Amino acid sequence: MTLTKRDLVTRIASETGMNQQHVFDVVQKTLDYISEALAKGDKVELRNFGVFEVKVRKARVGRNPNAPETDIPIPERPVVKFKAGKEMKARVLQRPPEAPPSSTASPGS
């Protein structure tokens, strides 16, 4: 299942009694400020949730799976990294592990 921005807005609006458009505006503005800070290279720390920061991924050589003999240079570039906070880690650790996907092959075949 995927939680979307729309899902967040409807849940917050129903739990708080606030107008959905107002909640949407606040959520969107929050996301805009986070994006803006990251674009400037700032770190975004949300206590008990986690930290977003921009790191530079080193340049490397990639390969085309359809033509593995051809090297493709991939330049260094900035990427957004997220490190979960203590509370989020604890909540995720409470989740039972998923069973591995079942194999279509029968045992012993």
Image (cartoon, rainbow, N blue to C red):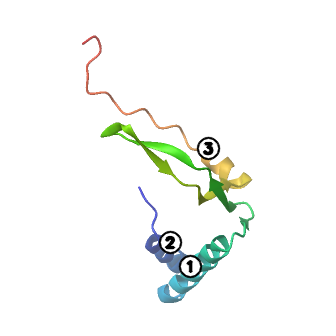
Q: Which one is in front, 17 or 49?
A: 49
Residue 2 in the image, given as x and y percentages of width and height: 43, 59
Asked if labels 1 and 2 touch by Cβ distance under 8 angstroms, the answer is yes
Q: Is residue 72 above or below residue 46?
A: above
Image quadrant assignment for residue 23: bottom right
Give the CA separation, mark 1 to mark 3: 27 Å
Q: Which residue is mark 1?
A: 27
Q: Residues within 10 Å of mark 2 (few under 14, many from 20)?
A: some
Q: Position of residue 103 (x, y in %)?
A: 31, 27
Cα distance between the residues tagged 3 and 2: 22 Å
Q: Quadrant of the N terminus?
A: bottom left
Kindly identify which residue carries mark 3. 94
Q: CA distance from mark 2 to mark 1?
A: 8 Å
Q: Which residue is mark 2?
A: 8
The label nearer to you, 2 versus 1, is 1
Residue 38 visible to the viewer: yes
Whether the residues at callouts 3 and 2 have beta carbons within 8 Å, the answer is no
Query: Amino acid type of disc 2?
Result: Leu
Which mark is in front, 1 or 3?
A: 1
Give whichever of discs 3 and 2 has the lower sequence position. Answer: 2
* Element at label 3: loop
Are there few (<14), some (14-19), or many (20+) residues within 10 Å of tag 1?
A: some
